[in-house]
Amino acid sequence: MIKRYYNLEKLIKPNKVLIIYGPRRVGKTTLLNDFLSRTKLKYKLDSGDNIRVQQILGSQDFSQIKGNATGYQLIAIDEAQQIPNIGMGLKILVDQVPDLRVITTGSSSFDLAQKVGEPLTGRKKTVILFPFSQGELLDKYNRYEIREKLEDFLIFGSYPEVVTAETIKEKISLLNELVNSYLLKDVFSLERIKGPRQLLDLLKLLAFQVGNEVSLSELASQVRLDVKTVDRYLDILEKAFVLKRIGGFSRNLRKEVSRKAKYYFLDNGVRNAVISQFNSLSKRNDIGPLFENFVVMERLKDNSYKARPGTSYFWRTYDGQEIDLIEERGGKLYGFEIKWSPRAKTKPPKDWLGSYENAQYKIINQENYLDFIGL
């Protein structure tokens, strides 16, 4: 088993809830079960899919909830988003049972976040588990092998089952099942999602626009929805861990574009499954966007896992000057232009250096991307 970044033993605290968010099928349950198999704490493992667990933890009945946890040092709840009023139930647990540690997992960010936010203020720690990061894969491969497998990651992504699958046919089958049966399951289950076909059309449009700025009005026109609905769908897809939104950076330089956004797929394999495109790189015309999506998401994983503070943006001016990824950290600006070809040479945009004193600029390509994403 490939070792994940998080060490749950170091993250759990008495009378605190550790919440592990993440897409379906990234290994949250495996991570939890591996920890439970090694811990010396007396624990109980429950599932949010269990009706009895739903009744107890959703009851807001102090005696029921406390009685269910009495005698244990740790309560673990998998798929906690299935439990009504789970936030209040968890609050009762950590407030009423001395020295109790609680771990929950949840796939539906938009669902679980709404249920646990306010009740657990000051009582929780939240982490996100992504598909395998390149850093985690050092547990299986060395740097040279990871670089040699770059094409595989660009086409099939980094979901655990896909990475460990032995054949291309199996990888494609797993990705199609992942998209159709798991990732979009939470989205389509929402009552307000009444146009699943249009939502899939929206995803396909975004798959072809990776690395480009997105106009909500243009998307709305193409999928025949109003702008507010498209904006809501995009928000849901991001909260469901399908997409990642990167906003435009501006400090009021009149020429800067700040209202538009870019959307990246959390995983390259999911992006390619949405458009049913698994050809080798030699037969593709989208290598640049694939590499940009991969590098941006691997950088965001590394930033998240290492708790590297800062905010990510893209930067562009109306006259066409642009930088793919901007990071603002500690009051400083770092610009990164992502190029597939090591031979691609670009100069820092004049308005970037002219407008932001001490701003940095660096090209990320096949030769140095491993350093950039934390290897």
Image (spheres, helix red, strand yellow):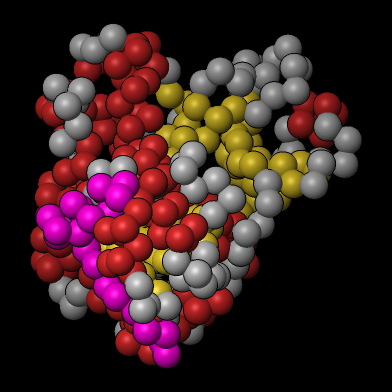
- Given the current orientation, which residue lies at the most extreme front position? 63
- In this orientation, which residue lies closer to the viewer: 193 or 265? 193
Residue pictured at 34% horizontal, 22% vertical: 232
Residue 206 locus on image (x, y percent): 33, 32
Residue 45 lies within the magenta run: yes
Which quadrant of the figure contains the N terminus? Answer: bottom left
Is 177 placed above or below 136 here? above
Q: Magenta region: which residues?
A: 39-61
Residue 199 lies within the magenta run: no
Is 5 placed above or below 154 here? below
Residue pictured at 87% horizontal, 41% vertical: 358
- In this orientation, which residue lies closer to the viewer: 159 or 24? 24
Q: Is residue 231 left or right of residue 68?
A: right
Residue 37 locus on image (x, y percent): 32, 87
Residue pictured at 30% horizontal, 66% vertical: 67
Q: Quadrant of residue 235?
A: top left
